Image: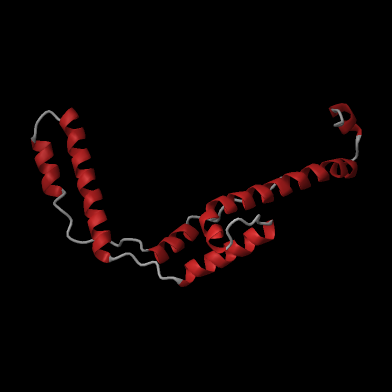
């Protein structure tokens, strides 16, 4: 049975820590188990390729995840520039279309739309487009991932 708040108030900080420690440890184990389960679900296809119909232990899941990530790291993940250009142009065109529709609802004359079209002529090249290696740097620059801690 959990101690009541009156009993907790009468305990010393050391005694409170003794009572709290098992709860904190259980929460930590639950977080680890949850993360391992999520990792298993994310990499389930890869696991079945290597060892179908095998019940995986936590250590197996972690080892296979490390192996998979090492394989992914060694494979170049380049996207053809023409594909990037095509995707960029499609997105740019969609944005221009949306902006014109918005102005169509709120602008009183078509002059504003003409000015916008002249300003937003079809783009020539991809501007400083972040490639995967640059994205990693950008993600690191945005700050570290905050890890939940119970204390």
The image shows residue 35, relative to residue 68, as above or below, that is above
The foreground one among 24 and 114 is 24
Report the quarter where the N terminus lies. top right
Q: Residue at 82% of width from left, 42% of height from top? A: 20
Front residue (pair 139, 10) = 139
Instruction: Tell me if residue 113 comes above or below residue 91 in the rendering.
Output: above
Q: Residue furthest front?
A: 53
Q: Residue at x 65, y 61 (%)?
A: 60
Q: Position of residue 49 (x, y in %)?
A: 52, 61
Residue 70 shows up from this direction: yes
- Give the number of callouts: 0
Say whether residue 64 is left or right of residue 110.
right
The x, y position of residue 121, in whole percent, is 13, 51
Q: Residue at x 91, y 36 (%)?
A: 11
Kindly tell me whether residue 151 is visible in this rendering: no
Q: Quadrant of residue 44?
A: bottom right
Taking 134 as reference, is 71 left or right? right
């Amino acid at each position: 049975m959990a101690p009541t708040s009156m009993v907790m108030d009468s305990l010393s900080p050391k005694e409170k820590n003794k009572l709290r420690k098992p709860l904190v440890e259980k929460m930590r184990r639950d977080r680890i188990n949850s993360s391992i389960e999520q990792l298993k679900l994310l990499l389930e296809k890869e696991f079945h390729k290597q060892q179908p119909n095998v019940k995986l232990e936590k250590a197996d899941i972690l080892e296979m995840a490390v192996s998979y990530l090492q394989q992914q790291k060694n494979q170049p993940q380049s996207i053809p520039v023409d594909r990037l250009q095509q995707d960029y142009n499609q997105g740019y065109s969609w944005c221009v279309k949306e902006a014109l529709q918005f102005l169509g609802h709120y602008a009183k004359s078509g002059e504003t739309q003409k000015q916008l079209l002249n300003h937003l002529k079809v783009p020539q090249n991809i501007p400083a487009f972040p490639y995967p290696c640059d994205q990693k740097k950008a993600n690191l620059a945005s700050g570290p991932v905050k890890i939940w801690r119970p204390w």
